[in-house]
Image (cartoon, grey):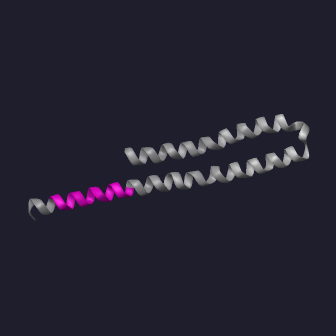
């Protein structure tokens, strides 16, 4: 096996590793964003239903809704951080 062939094999292997890293990062953020997206949708829906049934409690419901959305978004941010770590490390 000549030097050129060895060099081609090593470059091919490195390309495979980079491809696997990109695929892993895409899967991490893609799957990590599904849960928070569904959660925020359900959360906002239920909060709006509660405000519709009990308009006097709007401020309490809105505060709790925003707090819950922040916690739910933290999961998506965690998935983004994991995807970036996979991609760049």
Residue 27 is a magenta residue: no
Residue 10 is a magenta residue: yes
Residue 13 in which image quadrant = bottom left
Quadrant including the C terminus: top left
User: Relative to 87, is 4 above or below?
Assistant: below
Quadrant including the N terminus: bottom left
* Residue most extreme to the bottom: 1
Residue shown at the point (71%, 40%) measured from the top left: 68
Residue shown at the point (69%, 42%) measured from the top left: 69
Q: Main secondary structure of the magenta part?
A: helix
Residue 31: horizontal and vertical position, in percent? 55, 55
Q: Report the magenta residues as a range.
A: 7-20
User: Relative to 25, is 74 above or below?
Assistant: above
Q: How many marks?
A: 0
Residue 44: horizontal and vertical position, in percent? 75, 47
Residue 19: horizontal and vertical position, in percent? 36, 58
Indicate left or right for 28 with 19 as reference. right
């Amino acid at each position: 096996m000549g030097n050129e062939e060895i060099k081609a094999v090593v470059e091919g292997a490195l390309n495979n590793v980079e491809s696997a890293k990109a695929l892993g990062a895409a899967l991490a953020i893609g799957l990590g964003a599904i849960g928070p997206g569904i959660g925020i949708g359900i959360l906002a829906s239920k909060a709006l239903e509660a405000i519709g049934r009990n308009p006097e409690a709007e401020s309490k419901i809105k505060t709790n809704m925003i707090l819950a959305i922040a916690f739910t978004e933290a999961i998506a941010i965690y998935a983004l951080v994991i995807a970036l770590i996979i991609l760049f490390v």
